[in-house]
Image: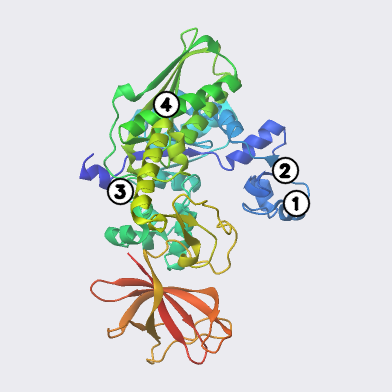
Amino acid sequence: MSGRDDEFPARMLVLWCPDWPAVAAATAAGVPAHRPAAVFSANRVVACSAVARSAGVRRGMRRRDAQSRCPELAVLGHDEARDARLFEPVAAAVEELVVGVEVVRPGVVAVPVDGAAGYFGGELRLAELLTDQVATRAGVECQIGVADGLFAATLAAHRSMLVERGTTREFLAPLSIAELDQPEAGRGELVDLLRRLGLRTLGAFAGLAGRDVVSRFGSAGLLAHRLASGRSERPPHRRRPPPELAVVKEFDPPLERVDAAAFVAKTLADRFHAGLAGHGLACTRLGIYATTERGEELSRVWRCAEPLTPHGIADRVRWQFEGWLRGGGLSSGVSLLRLAPEETVAGQSLQLGLWRGNADARDLGDGHELAEEKAGRALVRVQGLLGPESVFTAVLDGGRGPAERVRLVPWGDRRARESAPEEPWPGRLPAPSPATVFEQAVPARVLDAAGEPVRLTRRRELAAPPVAVGLPGETPRPVLDWAGPWRAGARPGAAGPSREQVRIQAVLAGEPELAVLLTGTGQENPQWTVEGVYD
């Protein structure tokens, strides 16, 4: 892909069915459209209808709270297979008009717009035809958006907008930074961190230099930065894989049951993923192709926000089979199934860990188990040469600060957690953690605008903003930006009683700039230390 393609991503049309999980669940349960309905998972709302929303029900709300606001609320269970199965008629209706339909997730389909728009007389006319087509054939309301790139087109669909070609960045700039946290993207922690750093809009995030984003937020941050900038959702190194990486399975007798399809999906997904991983690749667009015993051919392409794991591949194959088998798309059993990687990215996005417990490594089968065994023998040999306390592995524990959350365990000892990291830890430092955490904290001077040490209030807040930070052997550096404070518990004071601490993050001017984690305590005689340094 050329640099021009990188700056001007493909023109895409996205068709979005609002509140699809709630619509699908209500349809399956026979709940009438005028009755408020919500889908719950782990006792929290994951989707709700517009009628329920007008009564005060919101995503993330507990079931008890939702029912107290809307007593007549229909409570429905979360079922991704059901959502995908009932969405198949919508995808099929779109496919009757345009080619190249890709299912992003149940409720969202995307198509390249240029060819179809030219045939039907423009993008606006195409959007009108597709809206009528889906309403007539599938009986579903939808919204359509058109923009440069899938991400922008999805946000345009949420607003029923056609964004002019070349103006995608201007369209994205005023939108909330929360738009980066699309379903399956897993950017909740990143978005939360960006908010804490004062980046409230996509435009503010896009204004940062790419190299600074990579050094602070890593590859996940860089991908989000590309999206916020209106560029292609992936760097321009995608390649179409060789055809031999496709996986083909014939069935005799033909496959006609959903439970049998689910078993086949798991087996094929493992083979498919392992074949790609052997070539250093990961799949981002999965083609599912089926041939029936009567010679009918069906196909569907699933576009994925992140490289697919074996579990993700198996889910999509199972969902697609449910859509075909139960939705009436098949008049006879499936005699041949083919999985093809329509688009791949380099496999470093699925970099495997060395230690046991890595889920991806387990999914890839015996080859990685053998590698783990060889690594284990090598570490035992090192212990034999240098002693049992010479080799450690890290265990993620619960805690507030970076040093508290990682515990080193000698190789061979039981790697049991002492506390649960997923528990709510009030005052926990947000991700990412410092790259370097000092065993002995380094003293520092944190100064306000008057050149006085920054004190803490009784509520453990800063009495004044930090303006400069003095490190040992250096003149104070100006503070370019800072975040916090986060409460950090207590530590023994000089006279014995505990003293409450807080943590702040600060970016210091200089060549090069320096990002540090500072810990402070004291209302009358404040003391500050450098707990860690960020890369």
Quadrant in which residue 341 is drawn? top left
Viewer can see residue 149: no
Instruction: Mark 2 and mark 1 in contact? Answer it, CB < 8 Å.
Output: yes
Label 3 packing within 10 angstroms: few (<14), some (14-19), many (20+): some
The amino acid type found where label 3 is placed reads: Gly
Relative depth, front residue between 502 and 13:
502
Q: CA distance from mark 2 to mark 3?
A: 44 Å
Q: Position of residue 276 (x, y in %)?
A: 35, 31
Q: Which residue is mark 1?
A: 67
Q: Which residue is mark 4?
A: 271
Viewer can see residue 450: yes
**Residue drawn where x is 71% and y is 45% of the image:** 36
Q: Position of residue 123 (x, y in %)?
A: 39, 37
Image depth: mark 2 or mark 4 in front: 4
Marked residue nearer the N-terminal end (4 or 1): 1
Image depth: mark 4 or mark 3 in front: 4
**On-image quarter of the C terminus:** bottom left
The amino acid type found where label 1 is placed reads: Gln
Q: Position of residue 490 (x, y in %)?
A: 55, 78
The amino acid type found where label 4 is placed reads: Arg
Q: CA distance from mark 2 to mark 1?
A: 9 Å
Q: Which residue is mark 2?
A: 75
The amino acid type found where label 2 is placed reads: Val
Marked residue nearer the N-terminal end (2 or 4): 2
SS category of the residue bearing label 1:
helix
Q: CA distance from mark 3 to mark 1?
A: 46 Å
Q: Which residue is mark 3?
A: 166
Marked residue nearer the N-terminal end (2 or 1): 1
* 532 up-or-down from 145: above or below: below
**Residue drawn where x is 74% and y is 53% of the image:** 64
Marked residue nearer the N-terminal end (4 or 3): 3
